[in-house]
């Protein structure tokens, strides 16, 4: 990380800590406190994608389908299914769609999926998050200019599958230090490194450091972790440092929620990953001390509000 970036990050961390102090709610006798993260819940890209589907339900040319579940949240997906929105799980299922509208979710898809949709004459509504689209453009342009691409992220995550599909040669996907050490030391082609938008920032720089130290040439490093993720992770880490118990709300399959849990667990042993308030055993929450709440990018507001409301009752004795 260069010096300017390090300073900006430190300033922002301090600002987040100040905001957390201001947001802390206390019990009347001051023995317990609750902090609900400001960044908990839908990020810009997820909100945009979900709003797009609801809008298409009203005005789009049916039948309406989404390519993959629009977000990793079972409740939202169920609600949309009840409104007639079908989820297409993969390309094989796509072959059976002959009419209507296909919405591409915020994770994005490989280039060839757009071609398939065009050939089938379907209406395409693209809700790929603009930050993800930017990565598609980067890897496409860099591979066109002769670079090999390394994607730092989880190989099986749909966003990474999408990014992979914009590289002109097969990229290397790296998620661990062992995988970083196995990146080829040098070929005829220079190297460009990008990241999945929801990857852990510290881990990203660690893996970049390993890859760079093993290379004969200096790779181009594009930190494509989106600000929403960085802010959410920084805030979650800062709250977990203060908390005696930490609650992370999110879908079972949400990768960014799993990463948040991982980050919180490092700072606070008492971290609980729940989908709804029903998954939480209230007797495990401390009767004194501080409880923190955060949530992944695909967690609807009503779920966060419900958990916060119940925790206010239990911890702060407030209705
Ligand atoms: S986490 Fe960032 S990149 Fe991903 S959908 Fe949200 S705003 Fe877009």
Image (cartoon, rainbow, N blue to C red):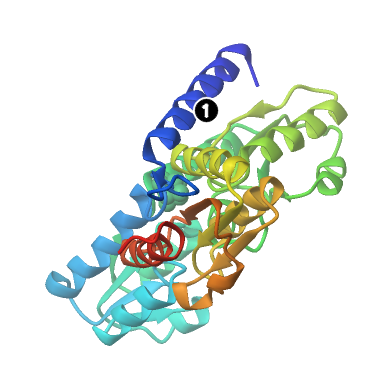
Q: Indicate the secondary structure of the residue bearing disc 1.
A: helix
The outermost residue toward the front is 29
Q: Which residue is mark 1?
A: 13
Q: Is residue 153 visible?
A: no
Q: Nearer the viewer, residue 147 or 318?
A: 318
Residue 18 picture location, percent across and down: 44, 28
Q: Quadrant of residue 284?
A: bottom right
Image point (60%, 59%), residue name: 258
Vertical placement of 177 versus 70: above or below? Answer: above
- 68 vs 194: above or below: below
In this view, the residue in front, 55 or 140, is 55
Task: Say which residue appears at 54% left-offset and 59% top-offset.
Answer: 247
* Identity of the residue drawn at 44% across and 65% down: 314
Seen from the viewer's position, the closer of residues 29 and 217 is: 29
Residue found 85% across the figure and 40% down from its top: 184
Image coordinates for residue 254, horizontal then vertical, percent? 53, 64
x then y, percent, for residue 311: 43, 63
Relative to 296, does residue 61 appear above or below in the rendering?
below
Tell me: 56 left or right of 98: left
The answer to whether 268 appears left or right of 7 in the picture is right
Quadrant of the frame with the N terminus: top right
Horizontal side, residue 61 vs residue 43: left or right: left
Disc 1 crowd, CA 10 A, few/some/many (<14, 14-19, 20+): some
């Amino acid at each position: 990380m260069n010096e300017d970036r390090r300073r900006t990050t430190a300033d922002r961390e301090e600002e987040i800590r100040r905001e957390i102090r201001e947001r802390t709610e206390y019990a009347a006798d001051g023995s317990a406190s609750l902090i609900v993260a400001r960044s908990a819940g839908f990020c810009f890209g997820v909100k945009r994608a979900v709003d797009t589907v609801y809008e298409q339900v009203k005005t789009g040319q049916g039948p309406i389908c989404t390519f993959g579940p629009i977000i990793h949240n079972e409740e939202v997906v169920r609600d949309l299914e009840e409104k007639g929105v079908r989820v297409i799980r993969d390309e094989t299922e796509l072959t059976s769609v002959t009419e209507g509208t296909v919405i591409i979710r915020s994770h994005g898809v490989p280039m060839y999926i757009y071609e398939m949709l065009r050939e089938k004459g379907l209406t395409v509504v693209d809700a790929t998050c603009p930050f993800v689209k930017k990565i598609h453009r980067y890897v496409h342009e860099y591979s066109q200019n002769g670079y090999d691409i390394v994607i730092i992220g989880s190989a099986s995550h749909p966003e990474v599958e999408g990014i992979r599909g914009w590289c002109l040669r097969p990229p290397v996907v790296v998620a661990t230090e062992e995988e970083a050490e196995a990146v080829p030391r040098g070929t005829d082609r220079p190297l460009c490194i990008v990241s999945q938008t929801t990857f852990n920032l510290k881990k990203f720089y660690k893996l970049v450091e390993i890859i760079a130290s093993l290379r004969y040439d200096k790779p181009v490093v594009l930190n494509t972790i989106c600000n929403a993720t960085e802010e959410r992770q920084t805030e979650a880490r800062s709250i977990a440092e203060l908390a005696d118990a930490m609650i992370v709300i999110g879908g079972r399959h949400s990768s960014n929620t799993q990463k948040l849990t991982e980050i919180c667990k490092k700072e606070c042993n008492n971290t609980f990953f729940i989908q709804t308030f029903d998954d939480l055993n209230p007797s495990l929450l401390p009767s004194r001390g501080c409880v923190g709440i955060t949530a992944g990018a695909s967690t609807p507001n009503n779920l966060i509000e419900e958990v916060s409301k119940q925790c206010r009752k239990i911890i702060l004795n407030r209705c």
